[in-house]
């Protein structure tokens, strides 16, 4: 699933291409529930990201809501240019005089009224990259879950919207925290502040560089580096698979730089599942 900064950058590009433009013939939603919705003639007033969601605001108070989840993407094409990818994977087309926005494999595509859009996203915590970012509220929400692990808390979009699997591992490393550390045992304010600074540094690229070195293979401390040497201490990076909200996730950490506060590093990463994790040196590519 894309990180929040990737979604933020996608929304900015879509806004630059579509905002203020009228939708033309060919604009359509290729999902059963909204296939008969008439889009041509409507104008896109703005496009924004909310956590990992993208909202297209239309001039008649309708909102097109999409979510990438694991496989979705939006592509921008000039009119008349060839689209990449098979036509059967297209879920939405927004055609204008200047650009065609084509949504591929989008698992969430829905046309909502303004109140429904607000209700749909009401569960989200403060958006790390949002204009209305509220650090105090994010801290409060995390502190309300003292028994959750920091790995859980950083993935939970209802606490803080935007961070994903990459930032979960990287923030834990940068903070020197084992991913199984209890939220109630750590400096939550420091973790929230670090998450904000790290994601802000990548908002213009969406590349999740955490080492300060954008060169391929050097951009991250631990994520995707299972079995390799820690860049800081040369200890072998550990990798564990676990289940989070019905999806398989992978966590990386350095056992020397991020010592466990209690218990072995191969116990379950979440109390909400009974799924055991397996530690391996296989890289996650």
Image: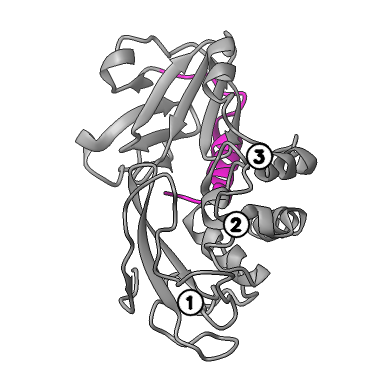
Q: Which residues fall within the magenta stretch?
A: 1-24
Q: CA distance from mark 2 to mark 1?
A: 33 Å
**Above/below status of 124 relative to 6:** above
Disc 1 target residue: 216
- Give the side of residue 221 with respect to residue 142, left or right: left
Foreground of the two, 44 or 62 = 62
Disc number placed over residue 182 in the picture, else none: 2
User: Is 283 situated above or below 77?
Assistant: below
The reply to whether residue 121 is visible in this rendering is yes
Tell me the residue that label 3 is attached to. 127
How many residues crowd around disc 2 within 10 Å: few (fewer than 14), some, or many (20 or more)?
many
How far is disc 2 from disc 3 in space, using C-alphas? Answer: 23 Å
Q: Residues within 10 Å of mark 1 (few under 14, many from 20)?
A: few
Task: From the top left corner, tell me how far across and down residue 276 is, in percent.
Answer: 32, 59
Residue placed at 59% from the left, 18% from the top?
Answer: 118
Q: Position of residue 124 (x, y in %)?
A: 59, 32
Q: Position of residue 278 (x, y in %)?
A: 31, 68
- How many other residues sit within 10 Å of disc 3, few (<14), some (14-19) or many (≥20)? many
Residue 49 vs residue 95: left or right? right
The part of the image, by quadrant, that contains residue 206 is: bottom right
Q: Which of label 2 and label 3 is nearer to you?
A: 2
Secondary structure at badge 3 equals loop
């Amino acid at each position: 699933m894309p990180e929040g900064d990737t979604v933020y950058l996608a929304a900015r590009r879509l806004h630059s291409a579509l905002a203020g433009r009228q939708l033309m013939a060919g604009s359509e939603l290729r999902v059963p529930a909204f296939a008969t919705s008439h889009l041509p003639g409507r104008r896109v007033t703005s496009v924004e990201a909310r956590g990992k969601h993208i909202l297209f605001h239309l001039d008649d108070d309708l909102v097109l809501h999409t979510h990438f989840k694991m496989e979705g993407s939006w592509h921008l094409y000039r009119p008349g240019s060839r689209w990449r990818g098979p036509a059967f994977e297209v879920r939405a087309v927004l055609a204008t005089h200047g650009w065609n926005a084509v949504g591929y494999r989008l698992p969430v595509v829905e046309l909502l009224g303004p109140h429904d859009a607000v209700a749909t996203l009401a569960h989200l915590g403060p958006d790390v990259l949002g204009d209305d970012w509220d650090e105090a509220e994010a801290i409060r929400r995390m502190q309300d879950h003292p028994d959750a692990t920091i790995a859980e808390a950083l993935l939970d979009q209802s606490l803080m919207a935007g961070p994903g699997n990459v930032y979960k591992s990287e923030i834990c490393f940068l903070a020197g925290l084992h991913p199984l550390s209890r939220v109630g045992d750590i400096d939550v304010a420091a973790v929230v502040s670090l998450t904000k600074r790290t994601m802000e540094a990548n908002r213009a690229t969406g590349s999740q560089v955490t080492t300060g070195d954008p060169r391929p293979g050097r951009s991250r401390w631990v994520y995707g580096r299972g079995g390799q040497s820690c860049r800081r201490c040369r200890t072998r990076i550990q990798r564990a698979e676990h289940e989070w909200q019905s999806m398989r996730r992978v966590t990386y950490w350095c056992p020397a730089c991020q010592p466990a506060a209690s218990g072995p590093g191969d116990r379950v990463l979440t109390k909400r599942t009974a799924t055991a994790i397996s530690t391996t040196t296989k890289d996650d590519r």
